Amino acid sequence: MPIDALPPDSLYRRCDPSSLSFRTTEELPDLTELPGQTRAIEAARFGIGIKRPGYHLFALGGPGTGKHVMMREFLARAASTAPSPLDLCYVNNFADSQKPLALRLPRGIAVKLRTDMEDLIRDLRSAIPALFESEDYRSRRQVIDNEFKQQQEAAFEKLQERGKAKNLALVRTPVGFAVAPVRNGTVMSPEDFEKLPEDVQRQVQADMEQLQSELEQTIRQMPAWGKERRDRVRDLNRDVTMFAVGHAIGELTASYRDFEEITRYLDAVQQDIIEHAEVFRAATTQESTSEEDAASSRLSDGSRLRRYQVNVIVDSSGIVGAPVIYEDNPTYLNLVGAVEHRAEMGALVTDFGLIRGGALHRANGGYLLMDAHKLFQQPFSWEALKRALRAMEVRIESPEQMLRLITTVSLAPQPVPLDVKIVLVGDRWLYYMAWQLDFEFRELFKVAVDFEDDMPWTNEATPAYARLVATILHREKLRPFDAGAVARAIEHSARLADDSQKLSMRIAQLADVLREADYWADQQKRDVVDASCVQQAIDSQRQRAGRIPDRVQETIQRDLVLIDTAGAKVGQVNGLSVIGLGTTAFGKPSRITAKIRLGRGEVIDIERQVELGGPIHSKGVMILCAFLSARYASDTPLSLWASLVFEQSYGGVEGDSASSAELYALLSALADLPIKQSLAVTGSVNQHGDVQVIGGVNEKIEGFFDICSQRGLTGDQGVLVPAGNIQHLMLREDVVQAATARRFHVFAVRSVDEGIELLTGIPAGARDANGLFPEGTVNRRVEDRLIQLADQRRRYGTAAGGST
C-alpha cells in the first residue's frame, strides 16, 4: 500500500494566540517557581530543609536551564526566615601570639568591639603618658631613685670612714673603685709607699685587702639594690598604669558583661597593657635622632599596638536572616581564607590582623553557592571543602605551609565551627563523574537537584509557559509582548526542544530571543512586541550563524560536493547528517553508495577501514549485515563482497542515523533497482528491519529542502524519516508552506520495506505461505541475487577442486 506524505499539520505544531487569556504580558503575574521542574523543586526543598550532615545539594542539568536563578531564589526564601548569623573576629592570643583566638559574637557586636578597642587604645595612648609625666608620678619615682642613691652613698661613705681611720682612701679609676694609702690627706705614690718600713707596708697592705674585700662585697650588693629599685619602679608603673587602664577597661567590661568570651579577652588585654605600658609611653615620648630611626621607632611601636586591635572577619550587621553567598572564584584562599604577610625592614612578618576570611566564613550559618566546574578546577579547593565539611569547622591553613614550600613563620588561627549548606551547580556529566570517582562526594552531596531540559507541552502547560515568558520580560525590563508574540515564542521553544510535544527549559536561549525581539521592536518604534519581531529575532540569529551552512550549500550548488536531487541511480542514496557548530546546527546531505560483487559474505565499511568511522556507526553497519543474513536466503551461505562509503567525506562519521540509508543503497545494488535521487533518507535500522528514531530530524529535513529549493522544487522531492520522529517535527515555515503546496514531501516510514518501496517505486514484497517473496518485488530480486552469488561461489569452488 503506497505511503502518503505527512499532512502539513504534522510538520509543525502551532500555538493559537486566541487560546492565551491576555492581551499583553503586562497582565500576567510573575512566576514564583519554574514550571516543569517539579522534581527539582521537591529535591531543593528537601535538601534545604533537612538539617543533617552530608545532605548538601548538587543542582545538575543542561546549560541555561535556570539552575542558578532557581537555587538562589530557594536559598533566599529559606534564608529570610532563618536565624541571623554570628559575627566573627580574630583577636590576639596574649598567651601564644602564633595562635590567634576566634570570637563568634551576635550580629553587630564585632564591629562595635573593634570600635571600642580603637577608642580604648587611642585614649590610653594619651592617658598613660600623661600619668607618667605627672608631678605625682615624678615625685614618687624620685623618692625611689633618691633612696637607691642614698643607699649607695651611705655604703660608700661607711667604707670611706673605715678607710680614713686606717689612712686609706677609695679612689675612682677608669675600671672602677680602688683602695689606696693616704698620707697627710694625699694618696701616696708607689715610690713613697716603698720607702715605708716593711712592717708598716705589711700592715697597710693587710688593711687595704680588708677594705678592698668590704668594697667588693658592697659592689656585689649593688645589683640586688638595683633590682629592688627596678621592682619598686615596676610596681609603681603598674600602679600608675592600672589607675589609667582599670577604669577604662572596667567600663568596657561592664558593657560586655553578657559576653563571656569578650570579658575574658578584655581581662587579658588589661594584664598585657599593664605589662607593656612602656609601649604607650614610647609612642609619644620617644625621640629619634634621624628620620630613619624615627620611622623604625614608629613602625615598631605601631606593630606592637596592633596586638590590641580586633580583626573583623565577618560582619553580619547588614544581613537579615541567614547569609546566601555565591563564590564565583572558589580558589583555596577565597574558600577557606588566608594568613597574609607584609614586608617590614626587608622581612615578611604577619600577625592576627592579617587573617583574611573566606567564603565559608561569610556563609557560616547560611548557604554557599558555587559552580562545580570552577571548584573542581582549582587546586586544593575541593579537598579543603571536603575537609571542612567532614570536620564541621573552618581551619585557615596556607597551601605553602601544608606542602612545606616556604619557611616563613605563619600563624595557626583557632578553627571556627562550621554550619553551612553547600549548593554546587553543574552539568550532569560532572555530577555522575564525581559520584563515580570520589566516594566522599557521595557521602557529602546526597541530594541531587535534577533539572529537566524540557517540559510537556499540554494545554495546561501553555498558560504557565506564557507566565514564564512574562517573568523573563519583567526581570529583564523589556517591552510587553502581545499574545501573538508569546505564541510564537512558545512555538520556537518547542523547536529548541526538538519536539512538538515538549517546551524547552533552556531559559537562557529563550531569554536571548526575547531580548532580541525587544531590540527589533525598538528599531521599529513599537511599544508592544508582536509576532513579527519575534520572528525577526529568530531569523536574525539564524542569519548570524549561517556562514558555514551557506558555504556547505554553496559547495553543493557548484557541484563541488556531488548531490543529486533528480533522476535515479543504482546503489546510491542521499543520506542526511547534522553538524553542530557553536550556537547553530544544520543539516548536510551526503551521498552514500554501495558496490557488490562475489565474495565471502563481507560488507566492508570503508569509513571504518580508514578509521574515519566511529564505533556507533560501525555498529549500525554490522546490524544491517545481520539483517541481510537473517532475512534473505537463510539456508544459503552469504556469498557477496560489498562496500559502503560516504562519498566526499573528509572527516569522521559517527552515529547510526545513516544505517537505513546504507541498507537502502545495498538493497538497491543487490536488486539492481535505481533509487530516486529526489528523496533523502535518515533513520537507524535494527536487525528486524524496523526504522528507528534519530536526532536532529528538523535540521536534516531543512538541509535537504534548502538544496532542492535552490535548484527548484519539482514536487517529487522529499525526505524519508522514521515514523517515531513525527512527534519531533517543528519545521521552518517555508518548508511547511512547500509541503502544503505539495512541492516538497515528508514521508514517515516504519520499516525498511516501506522505505525501499518509496525509494524505488517497486513493492518490497512479503513471504507467502510457501516462504517465498512474490516475483518482481524488491525482496525477491535481492534474494535471487544472493542465491545467484552463492551458486557462483559454489561453482567456482567445485571447478577449483575445493569444498564449498
Image (spheres, rainbow, N blue to C red):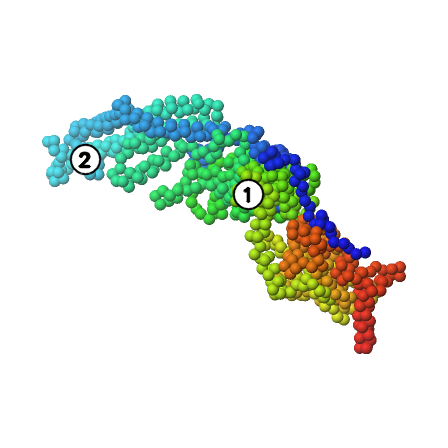
**Amino acid residing under circle 1:** Ala
| Residue 471 point in image, percent of width and height | 59, 37
**Amino acid residing under circle 2:** Arg
User: Image point 68% across, 44% down: which residue?
Assistant: 14
Asked if residue 712 lies left or right of residue 112, the reply is right
| Residue 744 point in image, percent of width and height | 70, 56
User: Image point 58% across, 45% down: which residue?
Assistant: 533
Residue sticking out furthest to the front: 741
Secondary structure found at label 2: strand
User: Image point 35% across, 23% down: which residue?
Assistant: 243
Q: Which residue is mark 2?
A: 172
Kindly identify which numbered label has been placed on residue 521: 1
In this view of the protein, which residue sits in the foreground, 528 or 439?
528
Count neighbours of disc 2 (C-alpha within 10 A) and say few if under 14, some if 14 to 19, many if 20 or more.
Answer: few
Q: Is residue 11 above or below residue 301?
A: below
Secondary structure found at label 1: helix
| Residue 463 point in image, percent of width and height | 66, 37
